Each structure stands twice: as C-alpha cells, then as structure tokens.
Amino acid sequence: QVQLVESGGGLVQAGGSLRLSCAASGRAFSTYTMGWFRQAPGKEREFVARITRSGAITNYKDSVKGRFTISRNNAKNTVYLQMNSLKPEDTAVYYCAADTGSSHYDYWGQGTQVTVSS
C-alpha cells in the first residue's frame, strides 16, 4: 500500500507561480514512475506530467510545456510540480499518482486545489 499526500496548492494571480509537492510512503519510491494529473470542474481528469524512476525522462501535456517542470527527490520520497506563468485555465484539483510497476497509475493522492485568478 502506498500513500500519497499532496501539498502546495492555493490561490494565485495569473502569471504567478506555485510549487506542488507529493510525499509518498514506503521504501520503494525510487522504483515508481510518478505522474501529476488535474481535474477542473465539469471536466474529466487529464494528464499533466510524468517522470520516470530515475528522473531521466519527463513528459508533459502540450499546454503546460515550458511553464511546468516535474522533478523528484528519491531520498525524500517526494515528487514536485513547479508551475510558472500560471493561467486561469490551469485552475483545477491537482493529483499525484504512482505507477508501481503495473503499467498504470495504481495509487492516487487526495488532491490539492489550485486556483488562478485573472
């Protein structure tokens, strides 16, 4: 069982920045691919970014490329999402998720709200 706890959400003006963190339980964090997803009101949950176990490979949703950066610290069992140049359309609940080797994201956090005002 893996527990994921997100933090760092909040209210920010357009053009501002936030850094989300996701702390994972257990000793096998370095073996997980980690992802960030988001869900806006009335919309389906969507992929935002992912990072491989070592951090060597990252992937992003097209609309956040160049503005968001995913990173991880395996010694701290934590994955981050640095969000810059935020836009009102980035407003959503952001979730981190872990792929523990099953080729799908099998553990999810509770989410953290990000609200970007115009």
Image: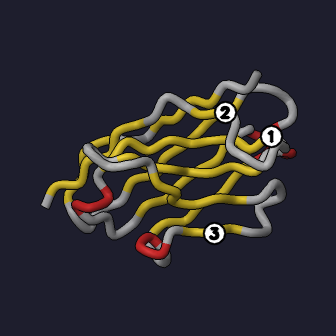
- Give the Cα distance between marks 2 and 1: 8 Å
Report the side of 34 relative to 53 (left or right).
left
Q: What residue sits 44% from the left and 70% below the top?
A: 64
Which quarter of the image is occupied by the N terminus?
A: top right
Q: Are circles 2 and 1 on residues that touch, CB within 8 Å?
A: yes
| Residue 11 screen position, x and y as percent | 24, 45
Q: Position of residue 55 (x, y in %)?
A: 77, 61
Name the residue: 48% across, 47% down.
Answer: 20
- Mark drawn on residue 28: none
Q: Kindly state the secondary structure of the residue where label 1 is placed.
A: loop
Q: Position of residue 108 (x, y in %)?
A: 60, 34
| Residue that numbered label 1 is attached to | 100
Q: Amino acid at mark 3?
A: Asn
Q: Nearer the viewer, residue 6 or 97?
A: 97
Residue at (57, 60) in percent of width and height:
49
Q: Quadrant of the C terminus?
A: bottom left
Q: Which residue is mark 3?
A: 59
The answer to whether residue 46 is above or below residue 56 is: above
Q: Which residue is mark 2?
A: 107
